[in-house]
Image (cartoon, grey):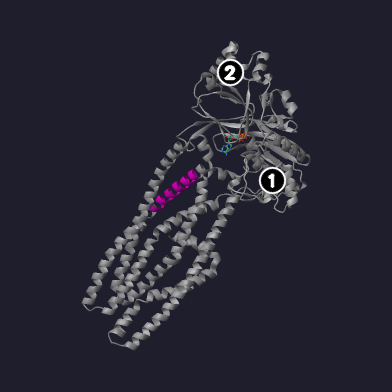
């Protein structure tokens, strides 16, 4: 309890004047409430019994005037309290929100979003409740108890002593339950936060849930979680009830003792009847106050947990700010060097191992490699989102930890694969990167990002409102808006993380042209899996399982005949028409598929014509687990995820792999006519080459040598 009061005093410290006003009005109010019962003794003993009506009217007049003053003071104190509460809440909200802006990215990846939200939705209101309870019922009841006790001692000391002992007994029960109440409450908060997290994730995952038909699974998993929450909820409610019930029982017991003992004293003429009535009135008012104090105990327990949680958030170490060395950054052409850098997200596996690279100012660089190889992590290290575990990065020769992060980030522009749009207009959203940009500058950037024409065609143009994180725009449009945002900033270093993954081929080609122009006077660092877009990049860094496997120019890497060459081979031989509606594969590429290896070129040439093109948009399921296989798929362009149902997990499924340009899937179920053993969903818009089951079977019947080869390959893949 003391801790809660101490914390509240800390929150209230900046508002000394309001606090003084509150206490003044409160004291006047209290004086009346506490002393009014004494008027009974005066009225009975000095006016009623001696039949002195003049005295009676005088007492009534004093009571009336005091009552008006009391009501006035009460109204003023309500006003002051409302103001104090609003200010303290606003202070805490601002502090927490500011702190969240300075927390490292790793914090947000570990914390459940439900937890973060419950700071605002549950913890702040419980502090508000405690503050209201203490400043109103708390102080009032405490003062009434204090004043009443003094008056009771004045009226009859032995009865007062009895009451005092009884009052102390009232608090014994809640005191003993205190620790248990706190742990029950903490468990309740945790379960509540976890449940909020699940609901929030569920809202965001609606497309996946409907696409995978996971409704029953998620309802079951939510019901299981709900059961755990209900137990915590029940324990919390029971504890609150006990905290109120135990003092009530003690109070009844004390009432009984006082009534008996007091009446006995009056019976034996130790006290007057007036004193007895005054005593009981005073005692009743004191009893109510004591009861009020016990009634607000659960509020204290709640507030204490909330205060501890908020303190934890506020004291969490902030993101590194770097040093103050920014002089060299102002040269606008930062050289980047990475020296034996290693990094792990957790203690299970290193995401980057001993990476060394150099990206001279004004050059272009690309990070490539298969999914999960560490290319995005490397980019995030350069953005300062994570701190290396070993090794270092240098900007213009200055160790990264000495570089002023704020100044560094002012010089960079980033386009992510998933781009967030804020609430507001399109103009606001592009302008976030340069708030003082003129409309002409914004339009210029939008034109370069190939989005101006679309914006101009909208009824409200640049004033079109973005809602629901940008869901009223397509993935490609969001990506182009993000590109406009980055271009508007005119950064010294432009980071592009799969920045064109959601675009169709025409838009991609046009934007790549823009990037090529932009790279003339700045450093551009690209993370991509589409090798055709980085052929002209100065330095290509090839990642493999967290290590830097190779580096060099496109030609140098092809000549090396290593991993890059293999990746290139996988993506070559696939072409897409300019409209993105027609994809083709050449016989050379076809011969690289395991089951067509060694097949005669003329036969392969015929087979290339048997493929169809299909396009799917991001989020759309391509094959469903359990369905009978009808097609074989080869990704001409795009990225898909392969998942399998896993009802025991929170999400309801597990991700098996991410496939991209040049990868293929779906052949096993097709050839063996078995149900699909996984679901494949498009992560980006995809152009797929498909081969129908009946076409494939016709082929296999016609060419028994392929049939034998195919069966052998499948056997190997199964093993
Ligand atoms: N926030 C994270 N927490 C824990 N592990 C992570 C996190 N982000 C990535 N990883 C792991 O680190 C490794 C490298 O991931 P990274 O995203 O850098 O790969 P990538 O090459 O960019 O892959 P992709 O092309 O699929 O984005 C992977 O094993 C991945 O599972």
Residue in view at x 53 percent, y 24 percent: 629
**Please, what is the dominant secondary structure of the magenta stretch?**
helix
Residue 186: in magenta span: yes
Under circle 2, the secondary element is helix
Under circle 1, the secondary element is helix
Identify the residue at the far left of this view.
Answer: 268
> For disc 1, does the CB lie below 8 Å from ligand 1?
no
Identify the residue at the far top of this view.
Answer: 704
Give left or right: position of 643 versus 142: right
Instruction: Specify the label residue 559 is tagged with.
Output: none
Q: Which residues are magenta?
A: 181-199
Residue in view at x 46 percent, y 63 percent: 132
Label located before the other in sequence (1 or 2): 1
Coordinates of residue 24 in the picture (x, y in percent): 48, 73
Give left or right: position of 249 versus 353: left
The residue that mark 2 highlights is: 696
Q: Quick check: can you spot residue 563?
A: no
Q: Quadrant of residue 396?
A: top right
Q: Residues within 10 Å of mark 1 (few under 14, many from 20)?
A: few
Give left or right: position of 116 versus 63: right
> For disc 2, does the CB lie below 8 Å from ligand 1?
no
The residue that mark 1 highlights is: 457
Splitting the image into four quadrants, where does ligand 1 fall?
A: top right
Coordinates of residue 122 in the picture (x, y in percent): 48, 53
């Amino acid at each position: 309890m003391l801790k809660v009061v101490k914390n509240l005093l800390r929150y209230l410290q900046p508002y000394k004047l309001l606090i003084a006003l509150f206490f003044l009005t409160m004291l006047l109010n209290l004086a009346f409430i506490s002393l009014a019962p004494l008027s009974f003794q005066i009225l009975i003993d000095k006016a009623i019994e001696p039949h002195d009506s003049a005295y009676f009217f005088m007492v009534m007049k004093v009571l009336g005037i005091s009552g008006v003053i009391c009501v006035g003071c009460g109204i003023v104190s309500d006003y002051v309290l409302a103001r104090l509460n609003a200010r303290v809440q606003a202070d805490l909200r601002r502090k927490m929100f500011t702190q969240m802006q300075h927390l490292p990215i790793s914090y947000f990846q570990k914390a459940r979003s439900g937890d973060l939200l419950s700071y605002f939705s549950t913890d702040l209101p419980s502090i508000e409740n405690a503050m209201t309870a203490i400043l109103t019922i708390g102080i009032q009841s405490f003062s009434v108890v204090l004043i009443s006790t003094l008056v009771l001692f004045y009226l009859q000391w032995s009865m007062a002593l009895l009451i005092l002992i009884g009052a102390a007994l009232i608090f014994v029960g809640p005191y003993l339950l205190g620790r248990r109440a706190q742990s029950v409450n903490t468990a309740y908060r945790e379960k509540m936060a976890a449940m909020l997290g699940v609901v929030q994730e569920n809202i965001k995952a609606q497309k996946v849930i409907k696409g995978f038909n996971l409704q029953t699974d998620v309802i079951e998993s939510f019901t299981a979680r709900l059961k755990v929450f209900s137990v915590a909820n029940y324990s919390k409610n029971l504890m609150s009830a006990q905290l109120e019930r135990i003092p009530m029982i003690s109070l009844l017991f004390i009432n009984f003792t006082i009534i008996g003992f007091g009446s006995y004293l009056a019976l034996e003429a130790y006290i007057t009847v007036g004193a007895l009535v005054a005593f009981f009135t005073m005692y009743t008012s004191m009893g109510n106050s004591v009861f009020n104090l016990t009634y607000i105990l659960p509020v204290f327990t709640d507030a204490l947990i909330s205060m501890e949680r908020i303190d934890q958030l506020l004291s969490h170490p902030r993101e590194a700010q770097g040093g103050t060395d920014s002089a060299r950054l102002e040269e606008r052409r930062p050289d980047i060097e990475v020296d034996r850098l290693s990094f792990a997200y957790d203690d299970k596996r290193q995401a980057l191992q001993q990476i060394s690279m150099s990206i001279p100012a004004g050059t272009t660089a690309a990070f490539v490699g298969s999914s999960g190889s560490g290319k995005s992590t490397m980019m995030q290290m350069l953005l300062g989102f994570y701190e290396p575990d070993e090794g270092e990065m240098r900007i213009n020769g200055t160790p990264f930890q000495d570089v002023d992060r704020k100044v560094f980030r002012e010089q960079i522009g980033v386009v992510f694969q998933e781009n967030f749009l804020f609430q507001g207009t399109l103009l606001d959203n592009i302008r976030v990167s340069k708030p003082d940009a003129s409309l002409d500058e914004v339009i210029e950037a939008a034109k370069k990002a190939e989005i101006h024409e679309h914006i101009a065609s909208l009824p409200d143009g640049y004033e079109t409102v973005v809602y629901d994180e940008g869901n009223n725009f397509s993935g490609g449009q969001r990506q182009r808006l993000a590109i406009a945002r980055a271009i508007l900033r005119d950064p010294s270093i432009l980071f592009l993380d799969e920045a064109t993954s959601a675009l169709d081929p025409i838009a991609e080609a046009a934007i790549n042209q823009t990037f090529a122009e932009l790279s003339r006077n700045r450093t551009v660092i690209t993370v991509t899996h589409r090798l055709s877009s980085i052929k002209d990049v100065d330095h290509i860094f090839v990642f493999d399982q967290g290590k830097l496997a190779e580096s060099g120019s496109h030609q140098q890497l092809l000549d090396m005949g290593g991993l890059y060459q293999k990746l290139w081979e996988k993506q070559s031989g696939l072409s897409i028409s300019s409209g993105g509606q027609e994809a083709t594969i050449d016989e050379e590429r076809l011969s690289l598929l395991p089951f067509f290896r060694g097949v005669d070129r003329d036969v392969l040439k015929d087979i290339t014509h048997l493929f169809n093109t299909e396009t799917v948009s991001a989020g759309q399921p391509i094959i469903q687990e359990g369905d009978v296989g009808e097609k074989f798929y080869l990704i001409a362009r795009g990225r898909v995820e392969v998942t399998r149902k896993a009802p025991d997990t929170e999400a309801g499924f597990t991700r098996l792999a991410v496939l991209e340009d040049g990868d293929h899937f779906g052949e096993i179920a097709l050839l063996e006519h078995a149900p699909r053993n996984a679901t494949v969903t498009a992560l980006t818009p995809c152009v797929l080459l498909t081969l129908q089951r009946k076409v494939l079977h016709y082929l296999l019947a016609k060419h028994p040598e392929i049939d034998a080869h195919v069966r052998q390959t499948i056997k190997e893949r199964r093993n």
